[in-house]
Amino acid sequence: MTDAAQNISVVAAKRVKVHFGAVKALDGVDLAIAPGECVGLVGHNGAGKSTIVNVINGGLAPHDGAVRYGGRDAGTGIATARANGVRCVFQELSLCPNLTVVENTRVMHPELKGFGWRGRALSIIRAKLDEMFPGHHIDCTAAVGDISIAERQMVEISIIFARVHEAPRLVILDEPTSSLDAGLARQLMDYVRKFVGSGGSVLLISHILGEILSTADRIVVMKDGKVVASRQASMFDVGSLVQAMGNVVKEQARNALAVKSSGSPLVDLPAIRGRGLPFRAYKGEVIGLAGLAGHGQTDMLLSLYRTLSSDWFPGRGDEVAFVAGDRSLNGTFPLWSILNNLSISSLGSFATAGFVKRDHEKALGEDWKTRIEIRTPDMRNGILSLSGGNQQKVLFARALSTRANMVLMDDPMRGVDVGTKQEVYAMLQTEAAAGRTFIWYSTEMDEIRLCDRVYVFRDGAISAELTGEEITEDRVLEASFEGEAA
């Protein structure tokens, strides 16, 4: 990085090093972002992406190296970064669930104060939501805890981009579309291009490589705490980008068995509230739940879980396991270790007279650490010591290590890197071939195509059932809007 590049940069990190004990989270990272530039930041889970974000936004002071804002040595800290126009949307959403959308806007923009601040905040956030996500239908007077995770993500992004006194100079988007369907993700990427075109800067972190390739001007690749590539986005394609990340991804293919929907169904439900199609699941199937976010897919999964695991006594309800997409809300136990988070659903298999066999538990943890590549030196470390994607790996391991015949998955690939996704897909196919059934809600079309059958949801009911070659993005979109007036 040249001194001239640093001087014109909104932010520039130079030879930054951060370590956590023996783990080198950052090992001499250089990263500069210029005005009017969208930089895509990619790398597998544990590559150091979240750490460099925390250094740039002031949440973490580097152990070595320096960070400059606008070419000045302004010091470190969140207040310093914010004073220099840096805003951040974290992968783990940070809104206060007990406050309304308007009140959360005030929390993020403390300059909204004095008489009539609620009215001003309401006007600002409504206008920004309308600009970024036309047709969103979000009630800005509602408590954040009462709206869907997709709506929470839209709200937090809109609050960050909103201008009260000064517009942000750099917005860091960490997996911003992880809970958004394809339509909402497209709206956001369109707005990012508009923001960058007007002179703003964006650091975009996403495991959806198509978003990076279509939106970023320049792509920076990280691996093992270092920058291993930095060049114009036009010089990459998906294959070369994945290769730069250090993992060759196998071509995705749907290898559905020719006939799976035979015999008696494991689940046979009538049409929801008498509307649409019934729902059936057979042994060994991978069933996809698709459609626009918030149209009843998660409600279906929760209803199935309540029905199939109604006995909460430990060791009962072994027929079903659940992989949460919103890990911070209903996935991880934040005060527990990685091992305890993984083993909690399997304790009955290695406990005698109420006492856990610790050697069996440790063996389970080490086995899954290797199989799914959980990036940690010690499974006894706290779960929050892991990156978001590695936390999600633990939730997968928790479910797949049980004896459950059916696994329910609520958009579980949020924040998981492309290499790990491929490994999980292979595991799912192997487990399904052995007779385990998966019911999988996903907002990513590439994942929906891997399913044997797909139910498309519209207004809380199933509007279409797709199989085989019918499972295409066009058919899913068609069924998602079925019944709308022309």
Image (spheres, rainbow, N blue to C red):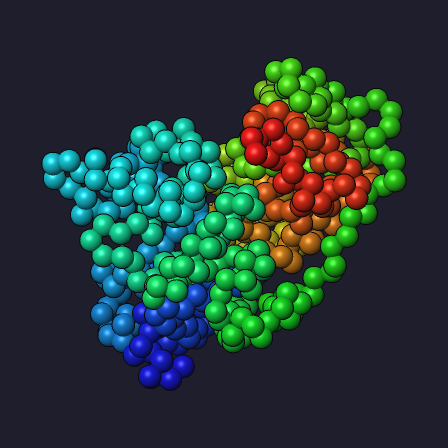
Say which quadrant the N terminus sits in: bottom left
Quarter occupied by residue 236? bottom right
Most distant residue in the front direction: 486
At x 40%, y 48%, the residue is 132
Q: Position of residue 288 (x, y in %)?
A: 69, 37
Q: Determine whether, in the image, residue 313 is placed left or right of residue 266.
A: left
Q: Determine whether, in the image, residue 344 is placed left or right of residue 133.
A: right
Q: Position of residue 301 (x, y in %)?
A: 61, 28
Q: Position of residue 55 (x, y in %)?
A: 36, 63
State whether residue 112 is above or below residue 12. Answer: above
| Residue 246 at least partly seen | no
Q: Determine whether, in the image, residue 263 is placed left or right of residue 413.
A: right
Most distant residue in the top direction: 274
Say which quadrant the C terminus sits in: top right
State whether residue 206 is above or below residue 322. Answer: below
Q: Position of residue 411 (x, y in %)?
A: 59, 40
Label count reads: 0
Quarter occupied by residue 172? bottom left
At x 52%, y 57%, the residue is 206
Q: Between 245 and 251, which is closer to the camera in this rendering?
A: 251
